Image (tube, coloured by chain):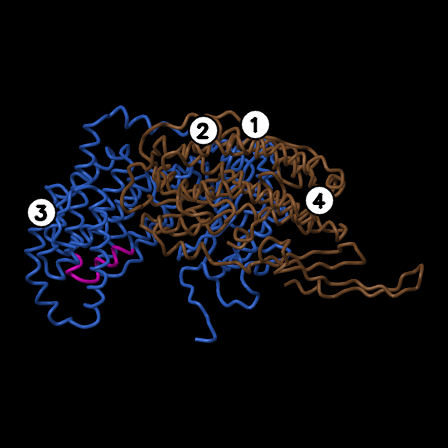
Chain colours: A blue, B brown
């Protein structure tokens, strides 16, 4: 893997990152199993190496990651892998949404310098902040409407272990605020990475390197993007053609049910700009009825209904269509994972019948109000819900 | 299974004093008219259906679960096996979903190849339906003609991508293979041939009085019911809703071609028969134009990263498959494997109305109604 010379194309780097990640994963496991004594020694040696590595990388552009890896010790590789992964993420974000690059650059450009000067502890904190920042920013730009979920974001981030907990939480919060919105998922991932980084010094260093690199890459991208065409950047920022519809739906619902029933409302730019609402489970059935029966909304057709397991929560996704207004609407309803339950809409759209049964069958989400909720695809005596992420197949013959 | 269907009423006829009893009839899962492994438990009182309970899942392979552990490109062959009668549209809906997330540009030539493949497949799919439907209700001949002509399409596909049914033809960003030399001309020939042949089909069956009397007025429902049951495709159009995603939410390059969306108002089996026949005609119309305008050169796959990693987020796209609206939902976390994939399968959704249609219906009409829904069990069970 390491001997080949790579062209610094994004695909190559992404691939390198993926490989490195897999490798580092294995290495980390190995380390956790035994060799704790030598680890301390190596750490001491590692410090300067990492510091040196981090600085030039912060200034230079991304490619070098692939070169050093071949010469590194396993621990260093782990560090490099983190760097590469972080870099790849940052880059993918930057490249994908060139329009966001200016914004991103403005925030991340000043970052690399301070980080390289920090103590390891500070680096750990900084890394957390960075991870939160990178993710939060991308989310924020994409789903600026999800401001309401900040509340979720903060607690998850602060759940990270280690001594830098408080710092991480504060940082994550600050970033989230600065970015205007952060999705719960983003924050959770950030929290996860932060915890990783904090549990060992070596990892903290790796994180710092990753941070510097990611920031450098993002900054470079941002500069490039700025240089190219400022006019082109402005264009995609124009509100979506569906924005007026979203506003209308939000207005109608808040008029009748108040603001608090909506957790979020945004245009899903990855999904053909469909207006998307996140609605509180408690009042979902009333609102569903309203969506169907209210004349300006009139969503008379349920195109799709299914559940998603996000490991910390379940979501049920609805895709509605109004044949009267010729408009689509996506609705998401969240529920907890321990006793997932979302009111059935079968009485409103009969087409929800089998879809809810399927969701129950494969994910174990209950739909109170459904008249005949039982398994549909799997046998009645099946154990467990296969589409759950922690599903382990039960087989009495094994 | 629902237990209360298993209890049957025993009674005595008030007029004759003869003991009567409801009976349970088990249809399938290996019944030829269920077009796969589908079971119907029917409670009958004499010849009248009291209740029908569909039982499915015999072909459930867990495609959605499998997809969570596969790279995006590796998922494509699995889509072939859902609606195996029309695999091209399945290929397309998945690729389209990923491309929508990544904002990929598809080269012109690839767009044409995709569209031609999908429309040929639509014709092939409707031919299978036409043949088997008539076979279901007792006519052997049409089946042979339909499969003879469908075989020509499968031969074309075989030349195009090396498979007759499970094509695995499309890729994220384009298609795998360019059309071999002379293929476009062969396709053109086929379209002309099929247009003529379609006339023969109509002569053979469409005007046949026995046939008309057999299916006219049965399996009827109205627009409101159709929408309530989330029906799509011909099932919906047969009640008068002019709705075709190729026209109303154009994808691929359908907006460049001139075609009609046939509708009917009766909402019965006959209407659905006529619509499918009319759709073959419209597909041939699209094919004629597309083959004529087919670009003489160009790339067949766009610039795509080697590892497909859609940005974190979710998408839901839907297109018009021969059986109705097929949708694909993808939740991504920015990794090379999807977090969750969900297929909205038209066969599964359309089949929901079956128990309602069968209630109070004559037992002899059961297969005629089931056939008119046009299901593929690979897709129902996914």
Q: Quadrant of residue B294?
A: top left
Contact, CB < 8 Å: mark 3 with mark 1? no
- Residue position for label 3: A55
Task: Tell me: residue B303, above or below residue B84.
Answer: above
Q: Who comes first in sequence, dot 2 or dot 4?
A: 4
Callouts 2 and 1 in the same chain:
yes
Give the label, 2 or 4, closer to the camera: 2
Give x and y (percent) for residue A19: 22, 55
Alpha carbons under labels 3 and 1: distance apart: 64 Å
Q: Is residue B222 visible?
A: no
How many angstroms separate mark 3 from mark 4 (CA)? 74 Å
Instruction: Write down the chain letter for disc 3.
Output: A
The chain holding disc 4 is B
- For label 3, count other residues whose C-alpha is less than 10 Å away and answer few (under 14), some (14-19) or many (20+): some
Density class for disc 1 (Cα within 10 Å; few <14, some 14-19, many ≥20) is some
Q: Is residue A370 above or below residue B177?
A: below
Of B266 and B187, which appears nearest the observer? B187
| Residue marked by disc 2 | B290
Near mark 4 (Cα within 10 A), the count class, few <14, some 14-19 or many ≥20, is: many
Image mark 2: chain: B
Q: Nearer the viewer, residue A350 or B74?
A: B74
Gap in angstroms between the C-alphas marked 2 and 4:
36 Å
Q: Report the Cα–Cα distance between label 2 and label 3.
A: 57 Å
Q: Earlier in the sequence, mark 2 or mark 1?
A: 1
Q: Could you tell me which secondary element the residue under label 2 belongs to?
A: helix
């Amino acid at each position: 893997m390491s001997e080949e010379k790579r062209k610094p194309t994004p695909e190559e780097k992404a691939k390198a990152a993926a490989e490195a990640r897999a490798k580092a994963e294995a290495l980390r496991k190995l380390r956790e199993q035994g060799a704790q004594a030598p680890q301390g020694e190596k750490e001491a040696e590692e410090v300067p190496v990492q510091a040196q590595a981090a600085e030039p990388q912060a200034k230079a552009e991304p490619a070098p990651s692939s070169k050093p890896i071949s010469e590194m010790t396993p621990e260093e590789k782990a560090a490099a892998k983190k760097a590469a992964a972080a870099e790849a993420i940052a880059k993918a974000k930057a490249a994908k949404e060139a329009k966001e690059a200016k914004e991103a650059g403005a925030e991340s450009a000043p970052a690399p310098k301070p980080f390289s000067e920090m103590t390891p502890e500070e680096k750990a904190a900084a890394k957390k902040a960075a991870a939160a920042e990178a993710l939060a920013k991308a989310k924020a730009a994409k789903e600026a409407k999800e401001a309401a979920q900040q509340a979720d974001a903060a607690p998850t981030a602060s759940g990270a272990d280690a001594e830098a907990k408080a710092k991480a939480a504060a940082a994550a919060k600050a970033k989230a605020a600065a970015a205007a919105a952060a999705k719960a998922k983003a924050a959770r991932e950030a929290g996860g990475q932060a915890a990783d980084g904090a549990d060992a010094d070596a990892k903290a260093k790796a994180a710092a390197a990753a941070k510097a690199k990611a920031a450098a890459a993002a900054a470079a991208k941002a500069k490039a993007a700025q240089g190219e065409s400022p006019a082109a950047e402005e264009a995609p920022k124009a509100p979506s053609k569906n924005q007026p519809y979203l506003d209308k739906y939000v207005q109608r619902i808040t008029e009748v049910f108040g603001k608090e029933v909506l957790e979020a409302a945004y245009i899903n730019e990855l999904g053909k700009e469909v207006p998307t609402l996140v609605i509180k489970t408690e009042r979902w059935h009333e609102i569903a009825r309203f969506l169907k029966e209210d004349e300006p909304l009139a969503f008379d057709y349920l195109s799709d209904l299914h559940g998603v397991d996000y490991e910390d929560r379940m979501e049920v996704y609805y895709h509605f269509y109004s044949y009267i207004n010729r408009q689509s609407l996506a609705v998401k309803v969240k529920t907890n994972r321990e006793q997932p339950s979302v009111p059935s809409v079968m009485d409103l759209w009969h087409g929800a019948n089998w879809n809810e049964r399927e969701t129950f069958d494969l994910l174990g989400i209950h739909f109170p109000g459904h008249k005949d909720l039982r398994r549909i695809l799997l046998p009645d005596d099946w154990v467990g819900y296969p589409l759950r992420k922690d599903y382990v197949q039960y087989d009495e013959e094994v | 299974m629902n237990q209360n269907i298993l209890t049957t009423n025993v009674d005595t006829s008030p007029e004759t004093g003869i003991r009567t009893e409801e009976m349970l009839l088990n249809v399938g899962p290996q019944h030829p008219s269920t077009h796969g492994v589908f079971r119907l438990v029917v409670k009958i009182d004499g010849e009248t259906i009291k209740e029908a309970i569909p039982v499915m899942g015999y072909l459930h392979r867990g495609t959605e679960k499998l997809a969570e552990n596969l790279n995006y490109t590796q998922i494509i062959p699995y889509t072939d096996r859902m609606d195996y009668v029309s695999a091209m549209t399945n290929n397309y809906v998945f690729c389209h979903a990923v491309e929508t997330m990544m904002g990929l540009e598809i080269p012109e030539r690839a767009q044409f190849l995709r569209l031609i493949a999908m429309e040929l497949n639509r014709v092939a799919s409707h031919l299978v339906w036409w043949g088997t439907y008539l076979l279901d209700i007792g006519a052997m001949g049409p089946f042979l003609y339909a499969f003879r002509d469908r075989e020509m399409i499968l031969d074309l596909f075989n030349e195009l991508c090396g498979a007759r049914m499970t094509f695995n033809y499309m890729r994220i960003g384009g298609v795998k293979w360019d059309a071999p030399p002379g293929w476009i001309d062969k396709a053109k020939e086929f379209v002309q041939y099929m247009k003529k042949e379609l006339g023969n089909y109509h002569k053979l069956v469409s005007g046949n009085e026995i046939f008309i009397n057999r299916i006219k007025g049965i399996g009827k429902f109205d627009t409101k019911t159709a929408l309530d049951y989330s029906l799509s495709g011909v099932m919906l159009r047969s009640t008068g809703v002019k709705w075709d995603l190729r026209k109303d939410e154009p994808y691929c390059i359908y907006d460049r071609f001139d075609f009609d969306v046939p509708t009917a108002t009766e909402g019965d089996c006959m209407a659905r028969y006529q619509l499918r026949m009319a759709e073959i005609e419209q597909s041939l119309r699209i094919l004629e134009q597309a083959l004529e305008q087919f670009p003489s050169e160009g790339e067949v796959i766009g610039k795509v990263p080697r590892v497909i990693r859609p940005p974190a987020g979710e998408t839901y796209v839907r297109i018009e498959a021969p059986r109705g609206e097929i949708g694909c939902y993808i939740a991504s976390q920015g990794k090379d494997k999807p977090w969750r994939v969900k297929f909205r399968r038209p066969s599964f959704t359309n089949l929901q109305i079956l128990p309602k249609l069968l209630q109070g219906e004559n037992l002899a009409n059961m297969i005629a109604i089931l056939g008119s829904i046009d299901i593929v069990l690979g897709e129902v069970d996914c």
